[in-house]
Image (cartoon, helix red, strand yellow):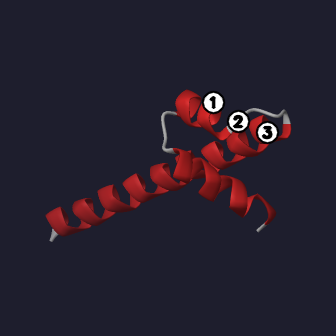
Amino acid sequence: MRDIIEEYAEKRAQKAVAEAERENNKKIVVKLSAKGMSVEEIASILDITKAHVRELADKRSA
């Protein structure tokens, strides 16, 4: 039973870290876009795909 609880806690922690990273990237994308940086430059800096940059930029108003 303890193993199941530990696995669940670890998965929740991983999800929380992933969400925090996504939110942080979203903020960075918005700031860099506002400064006129291109999608390609932002993708290179954050080491994510251009499609992911566009996705994060589209959600800035949401």
Residue with the most extreme bottom position: 1
The image shows residue 22 at horizontal and vertical percentages of 56, 51
Is 51 on the left-hand or right-hand side of 37?
A: left
Whether the residues at callouts 2 and 1 have beta carbons within 8 Å, the answer is: yes
Q: Which residue is mark 1?
A: 41
| Circle 1: element type | helix
Image quarter in which the C terminus is found: bottom right
Instruction: From the viewer's perspective, tell me whether residue 39 is left or right of residue 43.
Output: right
Q: Which residue is mark 2?
A: 38
* Closer to the camera in the image, 9 or 44: 44
Q: Earlier in the sequence, mark 3 or mark 2?
A: 3
Instruction: Name the residue beneath numbered marker 3.
Output: 31
Which of labels 3 and 2 is toward the front? 2
Report the Cα–Cα distance between label 3 and label 2. 12 Å
Could you tell me which secondary element the residue under label 2 belongs to?
Answer: loop
Vertical arrangement, residue 61 with respect to residue 30, above or below? below
Q: Please state which of the two labelled residues, at mark 3 or mark 1, is closer to the viewer.
A: 1
For marks 3 and 1, give the CA distance: 13 Å
Amino acid, disc 3:
Lys
Picture coordinates of residue 11 (x, y %)? Answer: 32, 60
Q: Residue 42 at x, y = what percent?
A: 63, 34
Q: Are marks 3 and 2 in contact (CB under 8 Å)?
A: no
Residue 12 x, y percent position in the rendering:
39, 62
Q: Amino acid at mark 1?
A: Glu
Which amino acid, by three-letter code, is at mark 2?
A: Ser
Quadrant of the image for the N terminus?
Answer: bottom left
